[in-house]
Amino acid sequence: MASSSRKKPARKSVRSRGLPIPRGFHTVTPSLAVVGGVAALEFYKAAFGAKELMRNTTPDGMLVHGRLRIGDSIVLLSDVFQGSDRVAPSTMEATTVTLHLYSTDVESLWNRAVAAGAKVTMPLADQYWGERYGHLQDPFGHHWSLSMRIPMSKATREMKQKEAMKAFSRGEHPARVSPDTDI
């Protein structure tokens, strides 16, 4: 019997196709540790319009791996498991990271996130660097800043910067001096 000189082509892996980074990912991708992973997936969908891309859970419902798309970016998240070196900010009541979201309609995104349960930690206001900007904390302890670029005259920008620098020189954060006024 003659052997066939034709062989099936080898199945190409992502790496062999020249794609060392999976489609849809950027160079840096945040991976959030949370307590209540499935609830966190639902919160981010409600608050930021995230699209759920993946959900892997244990038999008892803990999130091993979740993947969301917010705008053009992917965010990973999982529950904290015993023996892991990851800690959820809600268990420490602190975090060293803020996730920043740019939006074309920051007011609507802000209102949506607050309605979903985010806590305002710095009111949304026009800032001296030319953005409408504010901070939120989600129910899982993660901090988010939301903003959009805005038109601002040079005189207004300079006045706002001067006010902000005065607050900093007094050891105050400009946005926390008076929550009722834009800085």
Image (tube, rainbow, N blue to C red):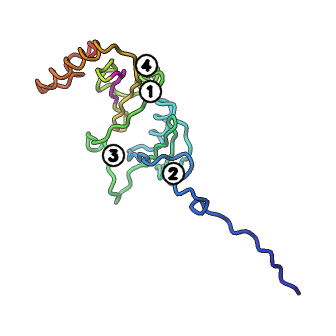
Q: Secondary structure at mark 4?
A: helix
Q: Which callout, 3 or 2, points to the residue nearer the camera?
A: 3
Q: Position of residue 120 (x, y in %)?
A: 32, 25
Query: In the rendering, which numbered label is found on residue 88?
Result: 3
Q: Which residues are magenta?
A: 130-136
| Label whose residue precedes the other's in the sequence (3 or 1) | 3
**Residue sitting farthest toward the right:** 1
Location of mark 2 (residue): 57
User: Is residue 133 in the magenta section?
Assistant: yes
Q: Is residue 155 left or right of residue 6?
A: left
* N-term mark: 4 or 1: 4
Amino acid at circle 4: Glu
Q: Is residue 39 magenta?
A: no
Looking at numbered disc 1 in the image, what kind of residue is underneath it? Ala
Amino acid type shown at disc 2: Thr
Q: Earlier in the sequence, mark 3 or mark 2?
A: 2
Q: Report how far apart the C-alphas of labels 4 and 1 lie in the structure.
A: 14 Å
Q: Which quadrant holds the C terminus?
A: top left
Task: Report the predominant secondary structure element of the magenta stretch.
Answer: strand
